[in-house]
């Protein structure tokens, strides 16, 4: 009997999405969520100022912890767009807090490591807030030893990037 993989769905992650949106101050914002297969990346985000809606796409094959951190990352981008800290791409340039950054070359290929751009640094830093928002998922007790009948544990942060 083969095991059928469980794919992530919006319904399954709605409680986490609501907590993240509240934390980011975008709770009432209409956002379309797409959980689907990606080949080159695990998520992307968009916000349209003309229609006042956001869109987040997430790879639906990741672990629960990874899916939550991706949701946090992409919803942070929606917030960045909404507050205009991050502006849309124009002719190979991205705009962060009014500063222009060369993002792609003439063939629409990234010219630097994508994680070096300030909007990505900000989103990755927000992923680290997962332990604050969801401590039951991102902390665990590690057994470090015992003396007699007394067992000793230490807290561990588990971000599971897999």
Image: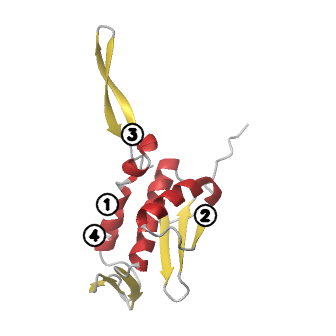
The residue tagged with tag 1: helix, strand or loop?
helix
Tell me where residue 72 appears, x and y as whole percent.
Answer: 44, 60
Q: Residue tagged by mark 3?
A: 139
Provide residue 61's location: percent of width, then percent of height: 57, 54
Q: Distance between the residues labelled 4 and 1?
A: 12 Å
- Choose mark 3 or mark 4, whichever is in front: 3
Give yes or no for contact between labels 4 and 1 (Cβ–Cβ under 8 Å): no
Tell me: residue 18, above or below residue 114.
Answer: above
- Please name the residue that numbered disc 2 is placed on: 36
Q: Which SS class for mark 4?
A: helix
**Mark 3, secondary structure of its residue:** strand
Q: Is residue 61 visible?
A: no
* Chain-order first, disc 3 or disc 4: 4
The residue singled out by tag 4 in the image is 116
Tell me which label, 2 or 4, sits earlier in the chain. 2
- Position above or below: 48 against 6: below
On the rendered image, what quadrant is the N terminus found in? top right
- Front position among marks 4 and 1: 1
Dot 1, crowdedness within 10 Å: few (<14), some or many (≥20)? some
SS at circle 2 = strand
Quarter location, residue 30: bottom right
- The residue that appears at 36% across and 77% down in the rendered structure is 110
User: Please, which residue is most extreme toward the bottom here?
Assistant: 91
Residue found farthest to the top: 148
The residue that mark 1 highlights is 125
Q: In this view, does 95 lie above or below 113?
A: below
**How far is mark 2 from mark 1, CA to CA?**
25 Å
Residue 20 vs residue 147, the one in the foreground: 20
């Amino acid at each position: 009997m083969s095991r059928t993989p469980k794919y992530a769905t919006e319904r399954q992650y709605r409680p986490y999405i609501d907590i993240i949106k509240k934390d980011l101050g975008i709770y009432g914002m209409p956002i379309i969520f797409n959980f689907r297969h990606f080949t080159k990346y695990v998520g992307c985000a968009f916000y349209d100022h003309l229609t006042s809606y956001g869109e987040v796409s997430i790879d639906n094959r990741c672990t629960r912890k990874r899916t939550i951190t991706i949701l946090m990352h992409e919803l942070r981008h929606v917030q960045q767009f909404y507050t205009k800290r991050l502006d849309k791409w124009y002719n190979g340039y991205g705009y962060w807090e009014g500063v222009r950054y060369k993002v792609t070359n003439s063939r629409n290929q990234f010219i630097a490591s994508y994680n070096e751009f300030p909007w990505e640094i900000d989103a990755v830093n927000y992923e680290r807030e997962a332990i604050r928002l969801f401590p039951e998922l991102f902390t665990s007790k590690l057994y470090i030893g015992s003396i007699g009948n007394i067992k000793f544990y230490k807290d561990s942060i588990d971000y599971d990037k897999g």
